[in-house]
Amino acid sequence: MKHSFEKGFFAPLPVLIIGTYDANGTPDAMNAAWGGQIGMTQVSVSLSGSHKTTDNIKLNREFTIAYATTEQIAACDYVGIVSGNNVADKLEKCGLTVTKSDKVNAPVIDQLPVTIECKVIDIQEEFGETRVVAEVVGLKADDNVLTDGKVDYSKVGLVIYDTVSKTYRTVGGSVAAARSVGKKYE
Ligand SMILES: Cc1cc2nc3c(=O)[nH]c(=O)nc-3n(C[C@H](O)[C@H](O)[C@H](O)COP(=O)(O)O)c2cc1C
């Protein structure tokens, strides 16, 4: 028998850490689960209008997205609990340091191994949410998550957000080759 539910419907959700600068060049970061890829080169994130990140993105129209990791999960959670509007040294408090991206006016968090650099294409404000659509202009990855010069997601320590249990879950191993295992039905 199949049961019906009204919420918690999309799984898995990513754990994206959005990096921005404010008008004074102070870095901020927030945790976002409501985000994803659009087509080959664009991303979208859905932000509450009250966040410092939302103001920073409107100001600079550039930001970064890093993947949260198991190793930094407490810091990644912390940036989703407190606002840079209330805690000026939010990143220092949880041990995160940043280096300015060479592609966008936004911080790359040193402790997170994979970061996407984004330029805003469109901002839509509706129902109290700010939907940001952006073009990906670059990706930075640390040496220790590469295999043969490519990002190896088995080395990143990726986590996903489970909205039902409200926990972060690890991402497991691969089960089959994509666009390949299904060929047996061709
Ligand atoms: C697991 C998790 C997921 C979150 N996802 C989102 C999201 O997708 N959109 C959003 O607006 N806020 C989301 N938040 C809340 C923000 O991260 C949080 O309000 C943060 O403090 C905002 O920081 P800022 O004001 O410094 O930008 C999430 C928080 C957590 C812990």
Image (cartoon, rainbow, N blue to C red):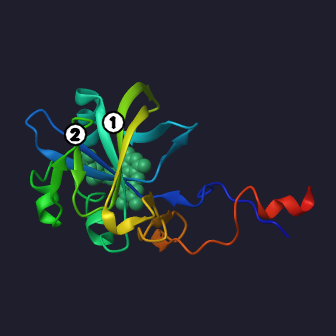
In percent of width and height, residue 181 lies at 78, 64
Q: Nearer the viewer, residue 55 or 69?
A: 69
Q: Is residue 88 left or right of residue 112?
A: left
In percent of width and height, residue 140 lies at 33, 51
Asked where in the image residue 39 lies, by quadrant, the reply is top right
**Residue at coordinates 31% horizontally, 44% vertically from top-left?**
64
- In this rendering, is residue 90 above or below 139? below
**Label 2, ligand 1: CB separation under 8 Å:** no
Separation (CA) of disc 1 from disc 2: 28 Å
* Residue 49 numbered mark, or none: 1
Total numbered labels placed on residues in the image: 2
Asked where in the image residue 186 lies, by quadrant, the reply is bottom right
Residue 129 makes an appearance in the image: no
Name of the residue lying farthest toward the front = 148
**Residue at coordinates 24% horizontally, 50% vertically from top-left?**
108
Q: In the image, what residue type sits under mark 2?
A: Asp
Q: Is residue 35 left or right of residue 139?
A: right
Please rate how many residues cluster around mark 2, counting C-alpha atoms within 10 Å: few if below 14, some from 14 to 19, many from 20.
few
Residue 164 makes an appearance in the image: yes
Q: Nearer the viewer, residue 140 or 124?
A: 140
**Residue at coordinates 35% horizontally, 31% vertically from top-left?**
119
- In this rendering, is residue 60 above or below 179? above
Asked where in the image residue 118 lies, by quadrant, the reply is top left
Tag 1 secondary structure: loop
Tag 2 secondary structure: loop
Pointer 2 residue:
102
Q: In the image, what residue type sits under mark 1?
A: Gly
Please rate how many residues cluster around mark 1, counting C-alpha atoms within 10 Å: few if below 14, some from 14 to 19, many from 20.
some
- In this rendering, is residue 130 above or below 164? above
In percent of width and height, residue 84 lies at 18, 49
